[in-house]
Image (spheres, helix red, strand yellow):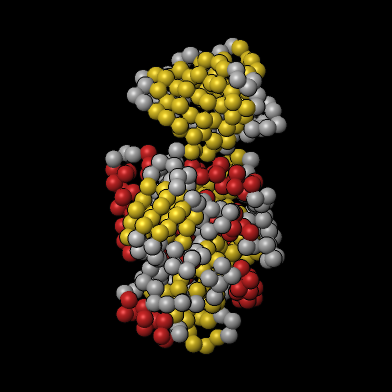
Amino acid sequence: MILPVIMAGGSGSRLWPLSRQLFPKQFLPLTGESTMLQETCARLEGLEHQPPLLICGDDHRFTVAEQLREAKQGHSGIVLEPAGRNTAPAVALAALRATVGSESDPLLLVLAADHVIRDVAAFQDAVNKAIPHAEQGKLVTFGIVPTGPETGYGYIRRNADGDTAFAVEEFVEKPDLATAEKYVASGDFYWNSGMFLFRASRYLEELKAHRPDMLAACEKAMSGAAVDIDFVRPAAESFLACPDDSIDYAVMEKTRDAVVVPMDCGWSDVGSWSALWEVSDKDDNGNTTRGDVILQDSKGCYVQSDSKLIATVGLEDVVVVESDDAILVAAKDRVQDIKKVVNQLKAENRSEAQVHRKVYRPWGFYDSVDAGDRFQVKRIVVKPGAKLSLQMHHHRAEHWIVVSGTAMVTNGDKEMLVTENQSTYIPLGVTHRLENPGSIPLELIEVQSGSYLGEDDIVRFEDQYQRA
């Protein structure tokens, strides 16, 4: 049976301002009501498979778990990479996890959580065609049938002999336009999708043959792994010693058993706003809109509003994206340069590169409503049955006003229920906790005041989510 391995890491900086380092594009609903991660899981329905195994970073663990819960999607575990080391080590961790047990050796269907696939039936058909080849020990990669001379993707050249699968002749880097045109005209090249199917043991065998140093580091990391409810935590020190490399470089370009199965499924890796415009529905003037948008005499634009009305007049081939704390306006043919904006934000240590105004936590979320030199106002929503850590702050006091629901508050040595329209005050330095004992979401307004209001001014004494 297939074990899907969904890689949910990465920062997606080219889709800023919606995609942020701590809430990247795979967790956003870019093409529909569901997030890209949820859509990746949903397109598995119809294939015979085990619940997917997820790979992500520690910072994204609760987001992954919450989005799976929202989608009512089971899973086979969430492996937390101590640091990003590219796809080859990530899949090695998954393969080692999948082969725990004397008879466990599934076919791994390696997928990225941030791809768009319009034709799910064609995707599943290609996977089913690949299964016999993977069962015979081949390492299958899926080649996207090109729709044009795209210069933003790598390519795979196939051998001419084959039926449902073709031997891989070579992997080639992103070409210039003239070379891409030759590739497409030949009919022997596919876009490199970064999706794979192979038996777990075969991947580990090839990794041992070609990158034994990488396999040794991953084996050591997994042998020292800790299991924390749904999360699998490889030993950090061992994994940090692992080299950084992709599956293509580490294994697929070196093995003699690589084959490519063509896939024509309306695929995109959505690597930019222009790529998202390409795969999105458009009006008669070639515009894509999401949210509250009014267009006048505008053509070929991508316009997305998160909360405010956006009106455009006389624009052509422009991207306009409004989020809760930033607005992007860019020429559609210059969207690759958005990464330079993100780099500048990081250099200036601005929060807009890292997080949104609304920040999700395992217990719910908070939304930063207003802030000044010595105050900050947040709207906090706590899920039923959830509770924050028992904590203390060195530099700020807090006022809590309950808007709806009931709060169980620990304030020093006292415990009390605070109901709608009631409030409580947490002095600086006092140990406290907020909990929702009810069956509906708890919503409150928090007013912080003090000399320092950063999120790192927190000392946790107890935390059910294992946060330091």
Task: Give the percent coordinates (x, y) of residue 121.
Answer: 63, 71
Asked whether 27 or 324 is in front, the reply is: 324
Task: Give the percent coordinates (x, y) of residue 290.
Answer: 49, 55
How many labels sit on residues? 0
Asked whether 76 or 279 is in front, the reply is: 279
Q: Is residue 26 above or below residue 410?
A: below
Q: Residue lying farthest top?
A: 413
Residue 268 in sight: no
- Residue drawn at x 70%, y 31% as measured from the top left: 439
Residue 59 in sight: yes
Residue 380: image quadrant is top right
- Residue drawn at x 63%, y 74% as measured from the top left: 125
Q: Residue lying farthest front?
A: 296
- Is 2 positioned to the left or the right of 256 in the image? right
Q: In this view, does 128 lie above or below 399?
A: below
Q: In which quarter of the image is the N terminus?
A: bottom right
Asked whether 375 or 51 is in front, the reply is: 375
- Residue drawn at x 45%, y 22% as measured from the top left: 448
